[in-house]
Image: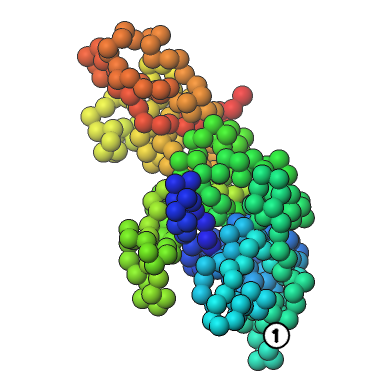
């Protein structure tokens, strides 16, 4: 899928493409939980150049397997891929010159064997689109938005029709993108920046169980195909010859249910953790924050099974978060007393809202971003 990672790259038209295998791996994890997740649904890929987007390719190829009702894909950029004119003949200017298509919507309501080879695949989709101009719609500008922009009126109309949104939106517009989905009460499966978990617009949705992390790729990054001119890349794909770059801060966000988020964490008691954990070696108890009534838990493995109070855990806990087992109370950005109210100036490092721990000598150490949780069984 083509999209810019941030506004700076957008200005340079540096485009990243989600790999087919990552889409396949993520989507099929939901099918393991519920094979009818996409059945009779309208899937809308609203940040995707058709035939350039692996999102569109995946859902087109698996249209019948998934039981889709309709597949819609929109793009505002047009496609820079050579050969695009062979898919859309009206853009062929002759003399081996091609006019890059402007904003387009591709709409599929069926995928069948068009070439008579006994199978329905991407070649049949290409042939269908060549034969049916009505399946591809040019999109006009809408007010301040270019045609095909997810905020444009035509795309909003497609959004209202859709059941599930699956795409990789611009990271710089992630807040606005998610807000639109929530406002329209849509199911979705999208890629975003890992740091978005702490955004003031996103974290409350996670806390209230309206958004959660997907099944794959959290805290390991994702690999994307990048343009040939891109100089910073990880490796070259042996099969496609494409440059591949790793974006460490990428993960999936969704409100589609999946089985992994209901797997309970197997935990030891507080006494067992204090005895066996390397991080807690030599301690008689867990550290307590001086500006919030909670204990510090450095890793999810050290969450004590028998502690009923509030606990501060790293953001990475969200990948293990089971809403049936835990509840989220807040974060160091939303709860706690300012350290200036409980400790003298100069005894703690400067910074924004956070939790602090005493070092035992009258000074206080600032803790990294923490989510505050407690066991569900302790809820009043």
Q: Nearer the viewer, residue 13 or 122?
A: 13
Lateral position of residue 288 relative to residue 254, left or right: left
Which residue carries the number 1 mark?
A: 113
User: Where residue 109 appears, x then y in whole percent?
Assistant: 76, 70
Residue drawn at (49%, 62%), measured in percent from left and top? 17
Image quarter where the C terminus lies is top right
Lateral position of residue 30 relative to residue 192, left or right: right
Q: Please, is residue 362 above or below residue 38 in the view?
A: above
- Residue 340 visible in this rendered orientation of the protein: yes
Q: Please, is residue 290 above or below residue 145 in the view?
A: above
Residue drawn at (24%, 33%), measured in percent from left and top? 281
User: Where residue 8 appears, x then y in whole percent?
Assistant: 44, 46
How many tags in the picture?
1
Q: Quadrant of residue 135?
A: bottom right
Q: Quadrant of residue 277?
A: top left
Residue drawn at (38%, 14%), measured in percent from left and top? 339
User: Where residue 40 appears, x then y in whole percent?
Assistant: 76, 64
Q: Residues within 10 Å of mark 1 (few under 14, many from 20)?
A: some
Q: Please, is residue 354 above or below residue 266 in the view?
A: above
Secondary element type, mark 1: loop
User: Where residue 297 appears, x then y in whole percent?
Assistant: 38, 32
Q: Nearer the viewer, residue 156 or 308?
A: 156
Q: Quadrant of residue 189?
A: bottom right
- Residue 185 visible in this rendered orientation of the protein: no
Lateral position of residue 366 relative to residue 147, left or right: left
Q: Residue furthest front?
A: 95
Q: Please, is residue 102 above or below residue 344 in the view?
A: below
């Amino acid at each position: 899928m083509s999209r810019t990672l941030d506004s700076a790259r957008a200005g340079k038209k540096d485009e990243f493409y989600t790999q087919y295998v990552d889409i396949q791996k993520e989507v099929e994890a939901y099918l393991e939980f519920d094979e009818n997740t996409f059945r009779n649904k309208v899937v809308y890929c609203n940040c995707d150049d058709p035939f350039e987007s692996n999102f569109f390719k995946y859902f087109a190829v698996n249209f019948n397997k998934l039981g889709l009702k309709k597949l819609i894909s929109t793009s505002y950029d047009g496609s820079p891929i050579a050969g695009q004119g062979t898919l859309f003949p009206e853009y062929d200017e002759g003399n081996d010159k091609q006019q890059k298509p402007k904003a387009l919507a591709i709409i599929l309501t069926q995928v069948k064997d068009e070439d008579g080879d006994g199978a329905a695949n991407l070649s049949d989709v290409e042939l269908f689109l060549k034969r049916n101009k009505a399946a591809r719609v040019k999109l006009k500008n809408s007010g301040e938005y270019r045609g095909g922009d997810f905020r444009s009126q035509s795309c909003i109309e497609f959004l209202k029709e859709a059941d599930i949104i699956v795409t990789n939106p611009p990271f710089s517009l992630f807040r606005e993108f998610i807000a639109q989905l929530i406002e329209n009460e849509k199911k979705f499966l999208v890629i975003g920046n890992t740091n978005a978990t702490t955004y003031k617009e996103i974290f409350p949705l996670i806390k209230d169980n309206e958004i959660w992390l997907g099944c794959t790729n959290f805290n390991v990054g994702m690999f994307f195909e990048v343009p040939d001119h891109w100089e910073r890349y990880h490796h070259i794909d042996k099969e496609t010859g494409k440059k591949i770059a790793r974006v460490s801060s990428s993960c999936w966000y969704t409100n589609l249910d999946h089985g992994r988020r209901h797997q309970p964490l197997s935990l030891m008691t507080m006494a067992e953790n204090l005895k066996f954990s390397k991080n807690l070696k030599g301690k008689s108890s867990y550290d307590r924050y001086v500006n919030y009534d909670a204990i510090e838990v450095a890793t999810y493995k050290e969450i004590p099974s028998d502690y009923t109070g509030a606990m501060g855990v790293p953001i990475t806990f969200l990948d293990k978060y089971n809403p049936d087992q835990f509840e989220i109370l807040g974060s160091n950005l939303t709860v706690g007393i300012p350290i200036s109210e409980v400790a003298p100036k100069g005894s703690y490092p400067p910074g924004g809202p956070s939790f602090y721990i005493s070092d035992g000598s009258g000074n206080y150490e600032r803790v990294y971003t923490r989510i505050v949780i407690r066991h569900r069984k302790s809820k009043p």
